[in-house]
Amino acid sequence: MIFGNIQNLKEYAFLEDAVKECFDYAGSHDLKAYEKGSHEIDGKRLFVNIVEYQTVEAEKRFWEAHREYLDIHLMLDGTEQIDLNFIQDMDVKDYVPADDFLPMDGPKNSSVVLKSGDFLICFPSDAHRTAVAAEKSETIKKAIFKVHI
């Protein structure tokens, strides 16, 4: 996992081209104006999901990871905590290929708090639990870029 802010993108020159393409896209498009839903960038290779939801207590959320896509969570508005662990430390359930969804249960190892401009890149070994309230429940808007690997 990589946690950062788009103001410091020059520090991430080592990132793969497809990941940098997501940040270029974010810099040249008004993602805050996008409607909720999935927006194609380059077919199934690269797309962005715009989500809006209310953050809640961690106990009300689920753990997940993905095998086919990297997740790049880019906060557009609000504050959200994302809990993290490695899948090898979790009780992994049955993979759902149609949704590229690997459910699991287990404890958090750490967490990050995303505010406007912050991003989190989750790789296949990164279990993550999203939509957790940081200090209080609030409505957030976030772009989740999906990069086929």
Image (cartoon, grey):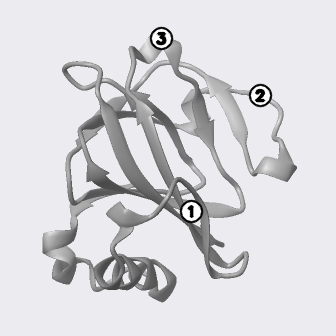
Relative horizontal placement of residue 92, taking residue 119 as reference (left or right): right
The image quadrant that residue 109 belongs to is top left
Q: At 55% across and 19% down in the image, what residue appears?
A: 106
Nearer the camera: disc 2 or disc 3: 3
Q: What is the C-alpha distance between the residues marked 3 and 1?
A: 25 Å
What is the crowding at mark 3: few (fewer than 14 residues within 10 Å), some, or many (at least 20)? few
Q: Position of residue 18 (x, y in %)?
A: 51, 83
Q: Earlier in the sequence, mark 1 or mark 2?
A: 1
Q: Earlier in the sequence, mark 2 or mark 3?
A: 3
* Callout 2 amino acid: Lys
Relative horizontal placement of residue 70, taking residue 22 as reference (left or right): right
* Callout 1 amino acid: Leu
Q: Earlier in the sequence, mark 3 or mark 1?
A: 3
SS class of the residue under badge 3? helix
Q: Position of residue 42 (x, y in %)?
A: 64, 85
SS class of the residue under badge 1? strand
Q: Position of residue 65 (x, y in %)?
A: 61, 44
The image quadrant that residue 67 belongs to is bottom right
Q: What is the C-alpha distance between the residues marked 1 and 2?
A: 19 Å
Residue 62 vs 45, above or below: the answer is: above
**Which of the numbered marks, if any, corresponds to residue 93?**
2
**Residue matched to label 3:** 59
SS class of the residue under badge 2? loop
**Which of the numbered marks, if any, corresponds to residue 36?**
none
What is the crowding at mark 1: few (fewer than 14 residues within 10 Å), some, or many (at least 20)? many
* Callout 3 amino acid: Glu
**Which of the numbered marks, if any, corresponds to residue 70?**
1
Nearer the camera: disc 1 or disc 2: 1
